[in-house]
Amino acid sequence: MQITEVRLRRSLRDGKTLASASVVFDGSFVVHDIRIVLGSQGPFLSMPARRTQSGEYLDVAHPLTAEYREELQRRVLAAYEEWRRRSGDAPGPGAEARAPGAQAATDEAACAPEGPDAADGSLAARAGGQG
């Protein structure tokens, strides 16, 4: 499965959540609400989860292998770091990010916020390479 697009939104939450990502796979499947969280050893990905009646959290979607989890984290965090670098560490509306080796997002569909990601601070970036 290739990661074909990474969209990032600035977090409106206080605390350790830095941003939220939506990742498109093979141009045909998207996973929303992947959080970039600041941990004691640096940023990491927190997959979308739901809370059960007992109070525990269960992932809604997640990689099945450690290798793919590492690849997903590497690609999303690279896009996040590029976003931070380009925006002077304060991502905002209209910012553009892309993973290393990715083609620039130049067409309207790739750059324009859409659907639930249309809140201020959202962005989309084409992510090339292997996924």
Image (tube, rainbow, N blue to C red):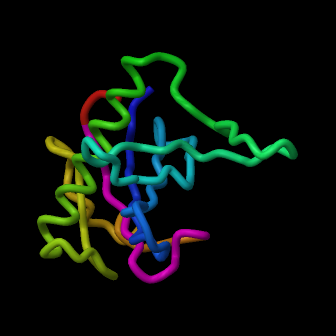
Residue at the location (65% across, 45% down)? Answer: 49
x and y, in percent, of residue 121 in the image = 39, 78
Residue 98 as seen in the image, left or right of residue 63: left
| Residue closer to the observer: 39 or 46 | 39
Residue at the location (20% across, 55% down)? Answer: 81
| Residue closer to the observer: 29 or 109 | 29
Q: How many marks?
A: 0
Vertical order, 114 against 60 (above or below): below
Quadrant assignment, res 92: bottom left
Q: Quadrant of the N terminus?
A: top left
Residue at the location (37% across, 34% down)? Answer: 72
Quadrant assignment, res 88: bottom left
Residue 51 as seen in the image, left or right of residue 94: right
x and y, in percent, of residue 114 in the image = 53, 71
Vertical order, 5 against 59 (above or below): below
Residue 70 as seen in the image, left or right of residue 61: left
Residue at the location (84% across, 42% down)? Answer: 54
Vertical order, 73 against 98 (above or below): above
Q: Quadrant of the C terminus?
A: top left
x and y, in percent, of residue 31 in the image = 56, 46
| Residue closer to the observer: 124 or 91 | 91
Magenta-highlighted residues: 116-128
x and y, in percent, of residue 44 in the image = 35, 43
Tell me if residue 82 is in the magenta stretch.
no
